[in-house]
Image (spheres, rainbow, N blue to C red):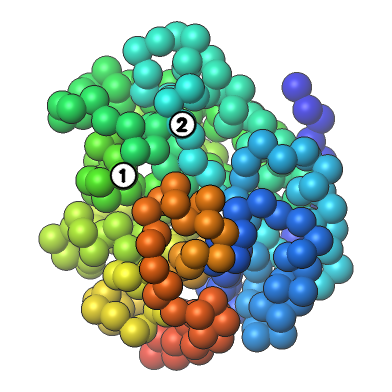
Amino acid sequence: MSTFSPPDSPIRSSAVPIGFNLLAWSAPISEKMHPIAERLKTIGYDGIECFIDNQNVAAYRQFGDHLQQLGLQSTTVMVVGPDENPASESANVREQAVAYLKGAIDRAHAMGATVICGPMHSAFATFSRREPQAEEYARSAEVLHAAGEYAQQANIILAPEALNRFECYLCNTMSQLAHLIRLVDHPNVRAMFDTHHANMEEKRFADAIRTIAPVLAHVHISENDRGTPGDGHIPWDDTFQTLAEVGYTGWMTIEAFTRNDVDFANSINVWREYNDPWDIAENGYKFIKMMQAKYGLTS
């Protein structure tokens, strides 16, 4: 078991911090991402979100050191595959899931991150060809509780994410996700809300946000086409107004996709460019700041 030390806690520039996910450029992190982080800082972002994979822990520590020098905080996102599926019938696979989640926590902690979000409750794009079963939720909850115990030592929040029906079957809605989080029953395992997936799966954004509000720890600001927030048809007024009503103070992180990283784009079926990443970053930031001001989400 790793020995964790408390992460630094820089002062946030706003009551609701704004982040940007580097997946618009690359899944792996490296020194090539340094200039991108620097420009995002100049735009005004409070933090950077990075994808967690099997890169050496040292790579995350090095990138985290650079972010700290810039005065940027960090969050992370991850997925699990069939070989480490928390909902699997196989006890061996579930053991691998716990080990994989612990490895992600080690990497996130090395970077100084405070949140790991993503569909860690079950294997991405892996389907059972039946509706979710009670025992699948129970198995996933047991794995996530064990991971939560480990995350607690690192002062990291795990925020499982509901995905749309084409990428996941266990958790598509906030109602299903809230059920799972109740089963997990751990203070370091909470939930996230992603506007892109909610656009496909929820009847009304306001109701969905209120459903998950008691355990909501992270929000992805993502347009219906994964391009620049504000350019599409996501019900943004409902989103920001309801987040303000429930007293949300966590991250609002833009997650948008491009074909800059071809391997990653192919893995999530991104076959065209939606917007230039700097258009997404610059205009998306302005849009979030405008909506935060409109609904009183800034300090």
The crowding category of the residue bearing disc 1, from other C-alpha atoms within 10 Å (few below 14, some 14 to 19, many at least 20), is: some
**Would you identify the image quadrant in which residue 226 lies?**
bottom left
Q: Is residue 16 left or right of 204 when viewed as pictured?
A: right
The residue tagged 2 is: 81
Query: In the displayed structure, would residue 198 be above or below residue 71?
Result: above
Q: Is residue 39 left or right of 175 when viewed as pictured?
A: right
Residue at 27% x, 35% y is 170
Structural distance between the alpha carbons of marks 2 and 1 = 12 Å
Residue at 32% x, 70% y is 225
Residue 149 visible within the image: no
On the image, the x and y values in percent for residue 131 come to 16, 30
On the image, the x and y values in percent for residue 130 come to 15, 26
On the image, the x and y values in percent for residue 69 come to 86, 68
Considering every residue shown, the one lying at the far top of the view is 91
Q: Is residue 198 left or right of 270 when viewed as pictured?
A: left
In the picture, which quadrant includes the N terminus? top right
Residue 212 visible within the image: yes
Q: The disc labelled 1 sits on which kind of residue?
A: Glu
The residue tagged 1 is: 167
Q: Secondary structure at mark 1?
A: loop
On the image, the x and y values in percent for residue 40 come to 67, 78
